[in-house]
Image (spheres, grey):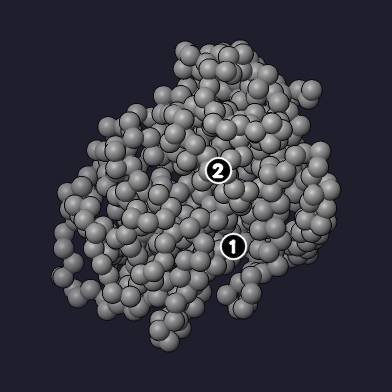
Amino acid sequence: MADTRTGGGTAKGFRGAEQGWPELDRIPHPPHRLPLLGDVVGAGRSTPLQDSLRFARRLGPIFRRRVFGKEFVFVWGSGLVADLADETRFAKHVGLGIANLRPVVGDALFTAYNHEPNWQLAHDVLAPGFSREAMAAYHPMMLDAAERLTGHWDRAAADGRTVDVPGDMTKLTLETIARTGFGHDFGSFERSRPHPFVTAMVGTLTHAQRLNTVPAPAAPLLLRRAGRRNLADIAYLNSTVDELVRERRRGTGGNGDLLDRMLETAHPVTGERLSAENVRRQVITFLVAGHETTSGALSFALHYLSRHPDVADRARAEVDRVWGGTAAPAYEQVAKLRYVRRVLDESLRLWPTAPAFAREARADTVLAGEHPMRRGAWALVLAAMLHRDPEVWGADAERFDPDRFDARAVRSRPPHVFKPFGTGARACIGRQFALHEATLVLGLLLRRYELLPDPSYRLTVTERLTLMPRGLRLRPEHRAPAPAGAVPAAPAGDRAGPPAPRGCPVRGGADRPRGPQGTAVRRAP
């Protein structure tokens, strides 16, 4: 069996979860387990996360599933997750679909095993690229990308047309990370179809997800055509990034952006530089992870804003009050949108676009004093269910309510109950970038438009390692600017305290607009 110890795990080490849990039989599993196939009754190939949420509600805060001979332990109870967040006892585990991305990006920041040195090298070299000073330098480019989005939405508003929200958010966030990080313009808003880079990226993410739905020995046969297509997608991603690097080497540089740091910056202690292969892998990682998750977060937030006009009105009033008549808000003004940030956090609570992360034991230990784990045993933390734990979030945890992130409410909750960016040393390095960009964009869109939903739409979620609303369309309608002096003062809760700490039912009634007391309200299409 492949070594599954911390720092030595491989994609072939899935059985380590079962062998590393001496009392596995104490952990419940779904009924009707089938020979060979395992716990597949009531599960679909395209919705593993949402299937796991259903099992979680039935089986409790820790449970297991067997699929094609692989045993997976899932954890979502807040106390159990708090224990797994202890960096002295647990570390990141690269498994499931994440390991399936290693043919794409190898030992890049997101996919490196703990023992691989390139993670620490790249992290130390690139961390200054997400400092406050660097973020302030990226801000004007974020505004430029947002202006291209609003130009597109302005034309739709003038014609009374709807817009493809996930598609447009993907275009926006791809252009933002490409320009701020690598000085490149994909021309996304000038295209009638997604850029081929996006198509290839979605293909690799989808293939990584599908590999978990078939028996490993049969994958080469069952996914032969998909495997060939995946190799072609990887080749396109590589060639795109190689050309981007060649352009930079031929040009005058990117004024200290991420690519400049990758190419020119030595490690502050060892003096080591990133190899050409490492540069390629990190660029692909940032282009994919730097826009895929943020576009999903923005799309979910816009869905909830369109379905909750009372929330949208309150957020819009804050934007009018804080930004006033400023055409282009300054960097410092974005963090002042505290209620808008709560909207974003609440959207990430319900649908964290990176919905799970895995943790493995550094040494033999007992999880929460109850479940023995041997070194290398691992569990998958269901962040999307952790964020719905009724013991933390209340009996109405499925309800959208940004005031859950009022500063007082945040202080009243235990730590480690909100994990949209992972946890610990291996949490998302770009989380501040994503949060600034998303808050800025929501503010700009709220100030400019009323967001009118399709009354017949019910939220459905596409899973491709990350989450995205499927088929979400809104009709943007221009709004008149607020008259001078007409904007009310901020509610006391919006003025008090700092923003929430920054960490890394799908259908039916849960998506209906709700008023302040949770009563259903209607909005004209």
Q: Position of residue 301 (x, y in %)?
A: 40, 58
Q: Position of residue 188 (x, y in %)?
A: 61, 72
Task: Classify 439 as above or below 95.
Answer: below
Residue 73 visible in the current orientation: yes
Q: Disc 2 residue type?
A: Gly
- Residue closest to the eye, 343 or 374: 374
Report the quarter where the N terminus lies.
top right
Circle number at residue 350: none
- Residue closest to the eye, 78 or 61: 61
Circle number at residue 174: 1
Query: What secondary structure is marked by label 2?
Result: loop
Please give the name of the residue rendered at 63% of the width and 48% of the height, measured from the top-left corner.
45
40 left or right, relative to 455: right
400 left or right, relative to 182: left
Report the quarter where the C terminus lies.
bottom left
Front: mark 1 or 2: 2
Q: Residue 15 falls in which quadrant of the image? A: top right
Instruction: Report, in whole angstroms, how far the alpha carbon at label 1 lies from the one at label 2.
Output: 36 Å
- Residue closest to the eye, 2 or 295: 2
Q: Position of residue 358 (x, y in %)?
A: 58, 32
Which residue ends up furthest to the bottom in the rendered image? Answer: 159
Please give the name of the residue rendered at 27% of the width and 32% of the height, measured from the top-left corner.
412
Q: Position of residue 356 (x, y in %)?
A: 54, 39
Q: Earlier in the sequence, mark 1 or mark 2?
A: 2
Per the image, the residue denoted by label 2 is 42
Query: What secondary structure is marked by label 1?
Result: helix
Q: Disc 1 residue type?
A: Leu
